[in-house]
Image (tube, grey):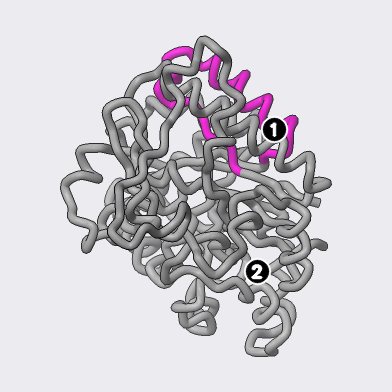
Amino acid sequence: MPRIDADAHVIETPKTWSYMTEAEQEFRPQIFVRDTEDGAPYRANQRNEFWKIGDHFQTKTNVSRDIDPEVRDMENIAGRIDHMNETDVDVQVLFPTLFLRPVTTEFDREMAIVKSYNRWLADIWKQSGGRLRWVALPPLFSLVDPGRVRAEMEFAKAHGACGIFMRGFECERFTNDRYFFPLFEIGQDLDMPMCYHAGNNSFANHDSYSRDLGIMIFKFPVMGAFLYLLGDEIPKRFPGLRFAFVEASAEWVPYMLNEARMRLQAKGIKVSDTLLNDSRFYITTQKSDHLHWLIDNIGDDNLIVGTDYGHNDVAVEIEIIQRMGADGSLPESSARKILESNPATLYAIS
């Protein structure tokens, strides 16, 4: 089976929006560069670059400077494949960067941006010979018309997408809100898991915390999504749907799993000993986790791992696939599950 990097990233560039139609050009995100005293060139001062989307500005941060920019930004896809070969990765699953934060609340602007992004990733997948898979952006503010969302996800599925991108807060709603049920049905029908990545799509929540409290903005929503989905038995409602919880480590899982069990039991609901497997939940582990302790507590059937390729934060370990497969710190059977069979099952990659 292939070794799968379950969480790598693309860095959006002006090319990302080149798939917009002429009528959609008013929605095109723009880059603004703040003047600097040292006159540093483009890409060298990420905190001096901003995306402007409608009336909102977003600083370009968390971008790796240790990777060739052309490889990181998908201008050199052959170079990206070469780097994957060097680190023993057969398939990368690509997540966005810009969309880890809220972008817009306007349904027509969102649709134009999402469609262009998805077509950019479709071209990347095609040029990679299928080795760069991706998680599709759904136009969530268009869920009042599920047919439009289904058509976009069908396009994505046909062009290499292997999951649907979600954050713990979406459209000022929690993940168990019935608003998302049509999307869950689409994911179930198309065999595309819901992938809850560290991030936030609530302007109210996002703007309530300073940058120093990023754990509240990015990590805790993933944990909340895990609890809310279990607590409302959403996996039982959609028995063919899988769920991923990405880039928030995994040591919190035993606590949240126990919390969910207590809440369900308080409702008089009998809870099985295999709740994670029954719910088809998969969680990314990372270098900060005590992996042996984690496996002792929850087993190895639900863990996956990602490099966080392209970013510059505490979750990054470009060589983790290579290290985990070679250093012998885990039983070979556990390593193979985490690197191969678990992510292959989650993303339906053969």
Question: What percent of the width, then of the height, locates residue 66?
Answer: 54, 70
Disc on res. 338: 2
Q: Is residue 186 visible?
A: yes
In this view, the residue in front, 333 or 50, is 50
Question: What percent of the width, then of the height, locates residue 311?
Answer: 49, 61
Mark nearer the N terminus (2 vs 1): 1
**Left or right position of 231 against 148:** left
**Left or right position of 157 against 256:** right
Name the secondary structure under disc 1. Answer: helix
Disc on res. 157: 1
Name the secondary structure under disc 2. Answer: helix
Distance from label 2 to label 1 (Cα)?
A: 24 Å
Tell me if mark 1 has few (under 14), some (14-19) or many (20+) residues whose alpha carbon lies within 10 angstroms of its own.
Answer: many
Q: Is residue 63 magenta?
A: no
- The amino acid beneath tag 2 is Ile
Q: Residue at x 36, y 39 (%)?
A: 32
Which of the 4 quarters of the picture holds residue 177? top left
Tell me if mark 2 has few (under 14), some (14-19) or many (20+) residues whose alpha carbon lies within 10 angstroms of its own.
Answer: many
- Point out the stretch of residues depicted in magenta: 135-161
